[in-house]
Image (spheres, grey):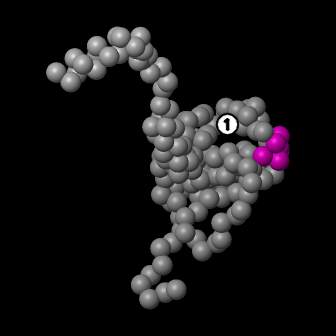
Amino acid sequence: MAGALQARDKAVRGHRRRALAEINVTPFVDVMLVLLIVFMVTAPLLTVGVPVDLPKTKAQTLGQDNEPLSVTVKRDGNIYLQNQPIAEDALVPKLTAIAANGYDQRIFVRGDRAVDYGRVMEVMGLLSAAGFTHIGLVTDVPKPKPGEN
């Protein structure tokens, strides 16, 4: 009954509520900020997609400002540029085409622990003969043994 009285009062006064035409974007902004944080955290983990068993070493990591190119030699001897397989004879032309800094582009060579050392050196020789001067080998840091600091 109270609802009927209110409706009649509104009709008499001539005031009618208009529909709310504004969109509340606060939940949208919250979701986008959470997604931004998730992608910022996970993006560095997705840089190299070819799994290899890297040898362990105690050398310190190099601090660099731009992202290097990655050449991987898998256990079976196949070569990958970033995470795409590539033929040995197509490696140097492809690197030359995509190198951002020309021959000063940093190139990291990742070789599986079980691959023949000579095979990794063949790939490094190809890169060196092509004129690339900033070539590095990538290793893994060994896990400390219990009792070591």
Looking at the image, can residue 40 be seen?
yes
Q: Position of residue 2 (x, y in %)?
A: 21, 24
Q: Position of residue 54 (x, y in %)?
A: 52, 60
Looking at the image, can residue 39 be seen?
no
> Is residue 12 shown above or below 121?
above
Q: Mark 1 is on which residue type?
A: Leu
Q: Position of residue 38 (x, y in %)?
A: 49, 47
* Most common secondary structure along the magenta stretch: helix
Q: Which residue is mark 1?
A: 91
The residue shown at (16%, 21%) is 1
The residue shown at (83%, 40%) is 102
Residue that protrudes farthest toward the left in the picture = 1
> Is residue 106 shown above or below 84?
below
The residue shown at (78%, 39%) is 100
**Is residue 103 inside the magenta stretch?**
yes
Left or right of 128, for residue 46:
left
Circle 1 — which element?
Answer: helix
**Is residue 132 inside the magenta stretch?**
no
Q: Position of residue 101 (x, y in %)?
A: 82, 42
| Magenta stretch bounds | 101-105
Residue 129 vs residue 21, the one in the foreground: 21
